[in-house]
Image (spheres, rainbow, N blue to C red):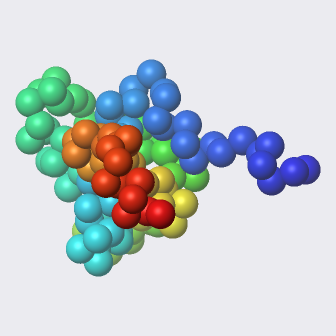
Amino acid sequence: MDVTRKRVVEASYLTADSAAHFRTILRYFYHQHERMRDFIAPEEIFEHTRSIPAFADYAEEQLHQQLGQLVKWNNLIARQYMTNAKTVEEYKKKRFRYQSTPYTIEIERMLVVLEKKSADNFQGSLEKPQFDRLL
C-alpha cells in the first residue's frame, strides 16, 4: 500500500467529537515531554484538566475512557504500574501510567508551530523592496 494513502489514525483526536478534551490531554503530555517527564499518572492529568474552567464538570471516568481511546489511536502507550499496592485488591486493579508516542509528540509540535504562526498574523508581502532583496 502506498504510504501517502495510509490513514493517519494518530490524527483522529483532532477531529473527534471530544477533540477539545483529547487536545487538552495530549498538549499536557507534550509539555511534560518537553520537561523530560514521560510517564504520567491519570490522577495528574485529571488534576490538570480540572484546573481549567471549561473542564469544571469533567469526570474521572470520562478521563479513563478518553485515555483508553487515545491508546487505541496510538497516541498514548499504557504501562501497568504495580508499586505501592498494599492489598490484593489494589494489586488486581490495573493501574496505568501513560506515555505519548513519538508520532503524537511530532503532531503536537507541528500544532504549536502552526498556532504561533497564526498568532503572528503570517502574511505575504508584495512590496517592491522585498522583491529587490530576494532578487
Quadrant of the rendered image containing residue 23: top left
Q: Is 109 in front, or is 126?
A: 126
List x then y, in percent, for residue 49.
19, 41
Tell me: 103 left or right of 37: right
List x then y, in percent, for residue 130.
35, 54
Looking at the image, can residue 24 be seen? no
List x then y, in percent, for residue 27.
31, 51
Q: Residue furthest bottom?
A: 36
- Residue at 45%, 22% (x, y): give it: 17
Quadrant of the rendered image containing residue 73: top right
Q: Is 18 in front, or is 131?
A: 131
- Residue at 65%, 45% (x, y): give it: 8
Looking at the image, can residue 125 be seen? yes
- Residue at 31%, 54% (x, y): give it: 129
- Residue at 20%, 55% (x, y): give it: 44
Q: State whether residue 104 is above or below residue 115.
A: below
Q: State whether residue 13 is above or below residue 25.
A: above
Tell me: 24 left or right of 99: left
Q: Is 71 in front, or is 25?
A: 25
Tell me: 68 left or right of 32: right
List x then y, in percent, for residue 64.
37, 41
Q: Is 38 in front, or is 127?
A: 127
Q: State whether residue 32 is above or below residue 4.
A: below
Quadrant of the rendered image containing residue 80: bottom left
